[in-house]
Image: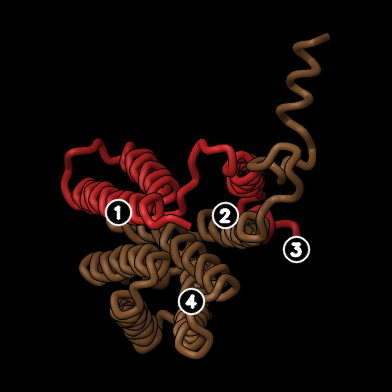
Amino acid sequence: VSAAEATAESTGVTNLNVSGGEAGPAPVAIVVSYGFWIFLLSDIIMFSALFATYAVLSGQTDGGPSGRELFDTWNVGIETLCLLFSSYSCGLGSAFIERRNLSAFYTLCAITFLLGAIFLGLEFHEFAGMVARGAGPSRSAFLSAFFALVGLHGAHVSIGLIWLAFMVAQIVSKGPRDFVLRRLRCFSLFWHALDIIWVALMSLVYLMAVRV
Amino acid sequence: MSDSPNVKKHSSSILAYTAGLAFALLLTGGSFWVSQSHTLWGPGLPVGLAVLAIAQMGVHLVFFLHVGSGPDDTNTVLALAFGILIVTLVVSGSLWIMSNLNGNMMPPSAIMEMSR
């Protein structure tokens, strides 16, 4: 009986109050990042549906070009490095703002933004090149699934860049106050999650097509 | 609030990000190398790439998103486990059902025969 009670206690249903025991509700920072984490997970589940679609349709080229003919490994490599270093500089930026080092924060945000913009430019260039050689989303089921999946990630990156610009503007106008820092932490989570999705895209979409 | 714990946390988080970057670069390099060279047996390549990708996602979760084993992370980890469950169900379930349907589909010649 005591063992069962102990398990029931340790896996309590409303366990949000983990840091304080009986000291009242959890701090707002923890609740906010937990809520945003739930949103990110639901976003990842939406991506998983498109990943499943792509995996099912990746061989259905309808006589059109396959991924092996279309994908450029160098382009993918540079895109990967852009996103990875962008994620790193975003993380460093949030570490510096916690210490109220504003100039380092602005520099790192500029690097994050620049790398994200380079990524988007490369992706747009790739898409435009594919459409120009007649391999647009309407060519085959494979290309429809490809453009939907990679395009949705690109749309997330674009929204992330706009959000980053807003966050820098808020730090400039309101200063590093608590509620601004909470929003910044959410942005940081969002940006890192996009990098996780890109890892799946890079390996399962691009690299797998190169030699199958 | 005293400054010393803050500073300590600061330098340790920079260290964590740098270690995460190093691991991620290593695993990314591994993925590209495996896909370009002929080290892996051809049909085993998707499995190798998937393993490297999952390892790199783990690195990102721990070093960049700071999903850990601390007391504040219990709910985060539980939600993550549920998310992974759903993602596995969606992806593997779709692949399974669709390959089954594909295997049972009538060959085009038989469909032509029926529509006559």
Badge 4 element: loop
Marks 2 & 3 on one chain: no
Q: Alpha-carbon distance for marks 2 and 4?
A: 41 Å
Q: Residue furthest right?
A: A1
Q: Which residue is mark 2?
A: A52
Q: Amino acid at mark 3?
A: Ser
Eye-nearest disc, 4 or 3: 4
Q: Earlier in the sequence, mark 2 or mark 4?
A: 2
Q: Which chain is red?
A: B
Chain brown in the figure, letter? A
Residue ID for mark 3:
B115
Q: Is residue A133 above or below residue B67?
A: below
Element marked by disc 3: helix
Amino acid at dot 4: Pro
> Where is residue A67 drawn, in percent x and y?
36, 65
Mark 4 — residue? A176
The percent position of residue A119, horizontal first and vertical second, equals 33, 77
Residue at 67% over, 60% down: A28
Q: Position of residue B32 (x, y in %)?
A: 23, 53
Instruction: Find the distance from the CA under tag 1 to the CA under tag 4.
Output: 19 Å
Are the residues flagged by discs 1 and 4 from a single subunit? no
